[in-house]
Amino acid sequence: MVKQWLGFGIRLVISLCLLILLFTRVNINDLTSHIRNMDPLLFILSIIFFILYLCAWAYRWHLFIKDTGLNVRYIDTIRTLLVGLAVSLFLPSAVGADMGRAYDMARTRVEKVKIVSTVLMDRLMGLIAIIAMSIVAIAVAGYEYLTVDIFVPIIGFALLLLIGWKIFFNIYFMKRFRTLFEAIPILNRVSGKIRDLYLVLYYLQQNRGLFTRAIIISIFTQVFEILAVMMLSYAIGDTVDPIFFFLFLPIIWVILVIPIAIGGLGLREAVFIFFFTQVGMSETHAITISLLYYSLYAVTGVVSGVISILTNIFNRMQFGVNKNS
């Protein structure tokens, strides 16, 4: 518990330091002016794309849930995903969202291993789609705007992911680790659950039809997210070419996987400024877009968190009434 709070404190300090540093480089009056004067129709369009992004994300996860035989409605998958977004406001974005939705869905079901496996596979599919889009964008236009220091790590990360995938899902190779689990007392206690989790993941990736559908949906998911950010940019009057959003945002999402900031706050704004100022966007515009997009996550997370808390309170009250009666 102490280590968890210490980690939270360190990430919070990093987020605050990054934000303070970035706000010293922008004009606050200009930033607030952009927000006050943004085009309401384009902002609404951004919200629509953001909703489509969340629905597509939930649908991809629901495909994995259904394939494991779990009886979960799509609407419940969306609700659980929103709970995950609420948790991600207080933890590193990707880690927090996955922990939140896995916990929320598993707390009322006994198939906890299956649920965790679907969360992991869903996250992996999203990461594969992001990296694939990053590589395509680099190949099409990135070589003109990105340095070797940017695209080499992306290519390297993609190769590591591919190699890791081949090794991890080689069931004969992974069987060799059983001896290691049995030799270490701490691991031996959970070796059965680890084996069950691995077998579910192995089964999911063996389903080629499911894998293909998940990749296609992942591409649509990322396109909706990119369009949401693009509409925010146009809403505040920026005119950066659309190709740069498809070039930079997948790379930014890969960077945000690094769990060094609370909800990606601070780190997100820094990388927005780093990339988009290379193609003529002002630092004030870049940080404004980033904060506006974060606000969509924040509002969604807060609202869904409040609804979840109120729903739990109502259910407990109903349970108490039924028990007394």
Image: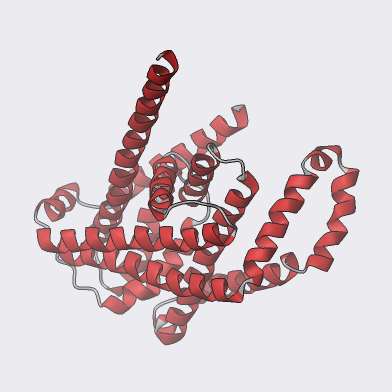
Q: Is residue 138 left or right of residue 107?
A: left
Q: Is residue 236 visible?
A: no
Q: Residue at x 28, y 48 (%)?
A: 295
Relative to 146, say whether 35 is above or below.
Answer: above
Query: Looking at the image, which residue sits at the far bottom?
Result: 140
Q: Position of residue 18 (x, y in %)?
A: 40, 46
Q: Is residue 72 left or right of residue 273?
A: right
Relative to 124, say whether 313 is above or below.
Answer: above
Q: Position of residue 273 (x, y in %)?
A: 33, 61
Q: Residue at x 38, y 63 (%)?
A: 56
Q: Is residue 51 left or right of residue 237?
A: right
Tell which of 304 and 312 is nearer to you: 312
Q: Residue at x 86, y 53 (%)?
A: 178
Q: Position of residue 315 (x, y in %)?
A: 39, 28
Q: Is residue 109 left or right of residue 314?
A: right
Q: Position of residue 242 (x, y in %)?
A: 27, 76
Tell which of 180 and 30 is nearer to you: 180
Q: Is residue 4 visible?
A: yes
**Res. 187 image quadrant:** top right
